[in-house]
Image (tube, helix red, strand yellow):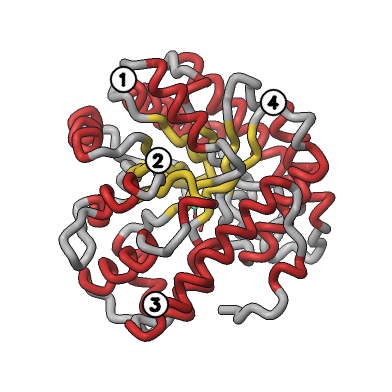
Amino acid sequence: MKTRELLDTAKALVAADRGLLAMDESNPTCNKRFAAQGIPQTEGARRAYRELIVTAPGLHESISGAILCDETIHQHREDGTPFIKVLSDSGIIPGIKVDAGAKDLAGHRGEKITEGLDGLRERLAVYSRLGARFAKWRAVITVGVGIPSRGCMDANANSLARYAALCQEAGLVPIVEPEVLMDGDHGMERCRKVTEEVLHSVFHQLYAQRVILEGMILKPNMVLPGLSCPKQKDVDAVADATVGCFLRAVPAAVPGIAFLSGGQSAELASARLNAMNARFKSLVPWALAFSFARAIQQPALEIWRGEEANVGAAQQALLHRARCNRAARRGEYDAVMETGRQRG
Ligand code: 13P
């Protein structure tokens, strides 16, 4: 393992107010989003869409790294250039999603365990040879009556830690993603408690598996009320609860916290990240960054709709969201940035 490289990559992923673009939707998830826009669910359409993203001019100004899925990492531009080379040549670090998805956890009704550890060492070696420099694994925690259980939290934390250790052995920076889902009518305090408990379990397991904290990035949910909770909170309250929770549970050695968007609107995700940085950037030990999929891509996807003629406009929408989130990292995002733009 080359520790220096790991540390440098982890730092680079959150440097200069840039953030990550998650474009690693599995084929079924990508197809579902295509179907909602009337886009054909074919390999060709997925390739064309990912080409639109990686060739958006100037994307590297706001995006430090892009997370691909197995299909995309093997794909090329129409002119034959591998996507991974397009990204690296433009100054964007390529990464790869390596989990095999969340499956029902035996004996735990309503809870999931993420699979994919079998053969992971060999797959990481292949991805590293292809040029990936970091990886991602997502664990899913559901909030409900009597859940999450200790068994679910600890099993997912253990898998995340074993994945992270294998990544570092292979020279890849692990993005460690324990996602507490937004679904439900629970209040923000419940989300805060569950998130803190999950994070304690994750960092306990990362320590036990000897993961170098300086060579990883945490990708968590923000602390939010459930989507159907009648008491929604303003952005400052979300920023306070989120940063307060992470101060209690995330060691200072971790270089960056790159939030997922989790189904928030694109504008709210930017506003909440902005509030965290405006209020706490100089006070917290880690970079407060982003690793959004939907909150960067959704407006662009809705403009593209599978039509070649819409590629330019869709790229502009993608770049706009990326720039808004870069501004949010500086605490300089303002809702006026949204006015005058076509919304998806
Ligand atoms: P969202 O930002 O759409 O939640 O996706 C982030 C991600 O990578 C999920 O694993």
- Nearest to viewer (mark 4 / mark 2): 4
Mark 3 sits on what residue? 311
* Labels 4 and 2 touching (C-beta < 8 A): no
Label 2 beta carbon less than 8 Å to ligand 1: yes
* Label 1 vs 2, first from the N-terminus: 2
Mark 1 sits on what residue? 169
Image quadrant occupied by the N terminus: top left
- Give above or below for 99 relative to 332: above
Residue at point 82%, 42% (across, down): 279
Mark 2 sits on what residue? 136
Q: CA distance from mark 1 to mark 2?
A: 15 Å
Label 4 beta carbon less than 8 Å to ligand 1: no
Q: Residue 95: which disc?
A: none
* Label 2 vs 3, first from the N-terminus: 2
Q: Quadrant of residue 50?
A: bottom left
Disc 2, SS: strand
Give the residue type at disc 1.
Glu
Q: Residue 254 location, x and y as percent?
A: 58, 25
Give the residue type at disc 3.
Val
Q: CA distance from mark 4 to mark 2?
A: 22 Å
